[in-house]
Image (cartoon, rainbow, N blue to C red):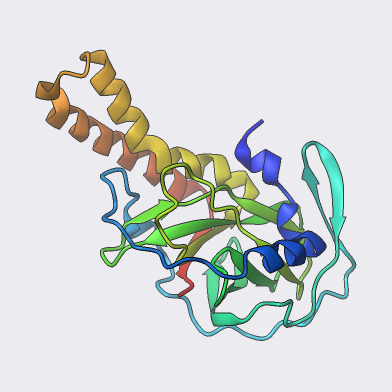
Amino acid sequence: MSPVDYYYGTFMKTLIVLSLFALTACDAPVKVRTAPTDAFSGSINTSGNGSTGFNLTPSTGGPTTGTTNGGTTTGSTTGSSGGINCIKTVTAFHSGLGSVDVCQDSANEVMFRLGFNTTDQSDGTCVVPMFRDSSGNSLYLGNAQCTKHNQGQVVTGQLDKNRQGYAGYQINSVMVLKYSGTNAFFQCMNAYGAQYNGCMSSFGGNPFYQSYCQSQAQTYMTTICNTFKSSYPYSQVLTR
């Protein structure tokens, strides 16, 4: 079972989110480190910093549904505030996604509110917590959180910042994409490291081949990422 399958649908569990919010309302200051060599190129970004979002009303189409751990879960939508004090509201847009309003809580970096202008009760829309540096390089910081939704629906939830070794990076952007594109997205994000490590292992870790393996890894990552970018809708927006 992939991390995406495991967490599918958990984003809209509002009651749990509010309890967790009370426990994690304040985050310690974060020192941003230099992005490692396997950082994903900022060229994935199609919408810059996003644009000013529009106000969405709570859904009138009933609860949202999704699956978690193989079972079916049902969660209701929240009101316009949803316990979130937005830093700003930005809009992720792609013709295959529609417009998704995104706001990050000012006191807790993992708390978000999403607003949808389309209905998707089949594939679902996902959000991945990201760190993006000033050069446009991006790193994912956790699993995708996904939800099925109706037009006009507002969903409040918590993103999982759980990527091992990356706790020192602050969530300052998110990648919005469809559930069907999540496997290809993470293959892209992990392509450099996987190829580089495999290459170096084949040479017994001999540092003489480091430059060669870096070149091979970069070429491989470019191929995998171009496949993702040409095959699936996505939009990355800065949230702070």
The residue closer to the viewer here, 122 or 183, is 183
For image coordinates 42% across by 49% down, the residue present is 166
Quarter of the rendering occupied by the C terminus: bottom left
Above or below: residue 239 compared with residue 163: below
Q: Is residue 37 left or right of residue 24?
A: left
Residue that appears at 73% across and 52% down: 10
Instruction: Judge from the rendering whether residue 175 lies leftward or rightward of residue 160; answer left or right.
Output: left
Q: What residue sits 32% from the left and 28% below the top?
A: 195
* 71 left or right, relative to 148: right
Q: Is residue 53 above or below residue 46?
A: below
Nearer to me, 201 or 117: 201
Residue 4 pos. (x, y %): 63, 42
Residue found at x 77% / y 72%: 153
Query: Can the viewer see residue 120?
Result: no
The answer to whether residue 101 shows anywhere in this view is yes
Percent x, y for residue 211?
A: 13, 31
